[in-house]
Amino acid sequence: MAPLILEIMTRSLHRYLPIENEVTTIGRALDNDIILSDPTVAPHHLKIIRYGDSSVEIVNLTDVNPTRINRYRQTSLVTEQFPVNLEIGRVHAQLLPHDYNVATTRPLAGGDRPGHLFGHISWAVVLVLACLVIGGLEFYLNSYNSIKWSDLFKYVLRETVLTIGAFVLALSILERLLVNRWEIKQLVTSISLMYLFYFFSAGCADLLNYLFTASWPATLFRFGWYLAIVPCAIALYLIHISHLKKSRSIVLAVLIASPIALPSILQSPELKTLLDDFSPTARYQNSLSSKNWHLRESISIESFIGQAQNLEPGEYAD
């Protein structure tokens, strides 16, 4: 008889146990051939019987949390078709032939190249320092009064360090729960890159506001950042660093980004501008662009005054 393998799926490394006996019992009791300690598994949960014609019979032995065979509750099943999916309580397993094809090997982040961006701790340190510099520069450029080193330090510590630290802590805990391991070096590198990308992209959006004399470039960037860029970045990290399946990574990315995206969008000045006539941000006048690219043709002061003089009470000029 061809050997069979029972794959028991866990959060990280799966267990692979050979099924060599004619009859193999599975359950929580210590007299079973395969012991599963999960409390939802019965003391004697199921047995696997191998026949000489290469067929296998899977027999359910419990009425509490009965075994699901290929997602259906069945008293027994005789089959020669593999793999066979088993749900033993809340333990998921597969019965596989010994020559079953396994997935291709996924390379480690950075591989065997010590100078790779995700392969060396020095890159993580450099990127974090770059984030601190960018955060301090932003504070300096947005300060209208003379600043003190103590104020700069407090701002950088509060905004940059806490932001990066909070994301690293939250995502590292999540990664530990998902794949049962830590990837702190790669996680710090990824979050620092996203932090820097946000500042440079936000600056480009503000320049486009000035270039087009409109506020829609920044509005599109803010909404796109939370609704598209952040989920895509998380999904790429889960796929290429944590090596999760694509479908699962996309769902998890949306779930992780949603608690960040919804409050940020609802509290953004851009959304308030769209929903209300009053805007906390300055509206752009049609003649601001250095390239003279206008959404509408600008008018002279004389023409504007002439229009204003012809208005009825309560009307306003375009």
Image (tube, rainbow, N blue to C red):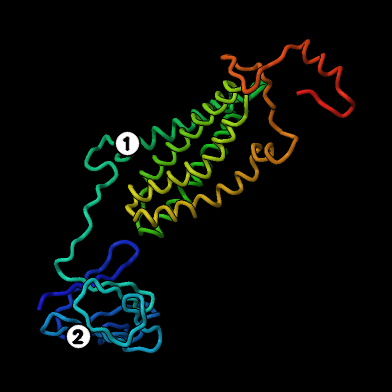
**Which of the two residues, 216 or 47, is positioned nearer the viewer here?**
216
Tell me, yes or no, whether the two marked residues, 2 and 1, touch with CB atoms within 8 Å.
Answer: no
Q: Earlier in the sequence, mark 2 or mark 1?
A: 2
Residue drawn at (22%, 69%), measured in percent from left and top? 16
Residue drawn at (40%, 41%), measured in percent from left and top? 190
Residue 8: image x %, image y %?
Answer: 28, 71
Q: Secondary structure at mark 2?
A: strand
Within 10 Å of the Cα at label 2, are there few (<14), some (14-19), or many (20+) other Cα atoms? some
**286 on left or right of 2:** right
Residue 164: image x %, image y %?
Answer: 49, 41
**Which of the two residues, 216 or 14, is positioned nearer the viewer here?**
216
Residue drawn at (81%, 26%), measured in percent from left and top? 316
Residue beneath disc 1 = 117
Quote the CA–CA distance across marks 2 and 1: 52 Å
- Residue 280 lies, with reference to residue 257, above or below; the image says above
**204 on left or right of 69:** right
- Residue 302 lies, with reference to residue 154, above or below; the image says above
Query: Which label is found at residue 49?
Result: 2
User: Quick one: quadrant of the C terminus?
Assistant: top right
| Amino acid type for the residue under numbered disc 2 | Ile
- View extreme (right): residue: 313
- Residue 120 lies, with reference to residue 294, above or below; the image says below
**Which callout, 2 or 1, points to the residue nearer the camera?**
2
Residue drawn at (48%, 43%), measured in percent from left and top? 228
The answer to whether residue 30 is visible is no
| Amino acid type for the residue under numbered disc 1 | Leu
**249 on left or right of 310:** left
Q: Secondary structure at mark 1?
A: loop
Residue 170: image x %, image y %?
Answer: 48, 51
